[in-house]
Amino acid sequence: MTHKLRIDIVSDVVCPWCIIGYRQLMKALEIVGDQVEPDFFWHPFELNPDMPPEGENSGEHIQRKYGSTVEQSAQARQRIADAGAALGFDFSYTPESRIYNTFKAHLLLSWVGKDMGGAKQTELKLALFAAYFQQGRDVSDSDVLLDVAESIGLDREQAAAKLIDVDHAARVRAEQHFWRERDINGVPAIIFAEKFMVPGAQDAETFAQVIRKVIAAPA
């Protein structure tokens, strides 16, 4: 018997552990096999809501935010790169890599999720991960975001309208607040069947165990 399983992911576009967690989750779904038909939905979280428009050098950001030394910052990025490579996702970090604010990206993601569903939203999310982590693009820049949206078949004019829609922005702010009110202060946070929340980028076996427990639980 195949169980339909809603999977909500609270995530940020510039969070490396979010794409790593997603890749681990996909491996877990392979382990579980045809027992589950997943339905993904992504929700907004800004790691750096106060980031200035020009962004900040990634290495310097890690040093400042976490009190890391230059060596510790480099080691942290290498751990991320190694974890990604093991899952088939190559991070293209350079000394010039920058981190950006992502609110505009969440405007597009929320619009697509609401109007087009989780599958198209996931396609956009993965395209944004690739644009940022693999192509080094500025995901706070409207033109970059519209290029990415257009690359997966979205209407550029509709997407542009969502970037300046004040009411839509207010809804996304409210959704961010909703998740923070539920004590989600770090990402990824993955919620299975709207009941069971798993924090962080767990390994595939851990996710698989959770999925089995969720589908075995009484409705």
Image: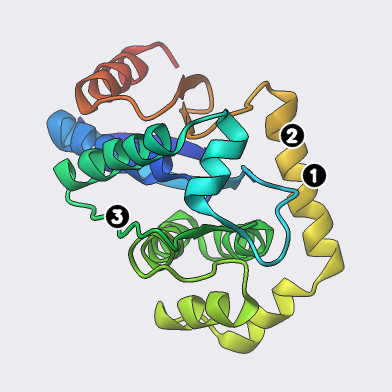
- Looking at the rendered structure, the kind of residue marked 3 is Phe
Query: CB of mark 2 within 8 Å of CB of mark 1?
Result: yes
Position of residue 125 relative to residue 83, above or below, is below
Residue drawn where x is 41% and y is 81% of the image: 151
Label pair 3/2, CB-CB below 8 angstroms: no
In the rendered view of the protein, which quadrant contains the N terminus?
A: top left
User: In screen coordinates, is 218 left or right of 30?
Assistant: right
Q: In this figure, which residue is indicated by the disc labeled 1?
A: 174
Q: Position of residue 52 (x, y in %)?
A: 73, 59
Crowding around mark 1 (Cα neighbors within 10 Å: few <14, some 14 to 19, many 20+) is: few
- Looking at the image, which residue is at 62% across and 42% down? 47
Residue 189 image label: none
Pick the front one: 32 or 128: 128
Q: Nearer the viewer, mark 3 or mark 2?
A: 3
Residue sitting nearer the eye, 202 or 54: 54
The quarter holding residue 166 reads bottom right
Kindly identify which residue carries mark 3: 91
Q: Is residue 118 above or below residue 54?
A: above
Q: Which label's residue is closer to the chain start, 3 or 1?
A: 3
Query: Dot 1 lies on which element?
Result: helix
Q: Which residue is mark 2?
A: 178
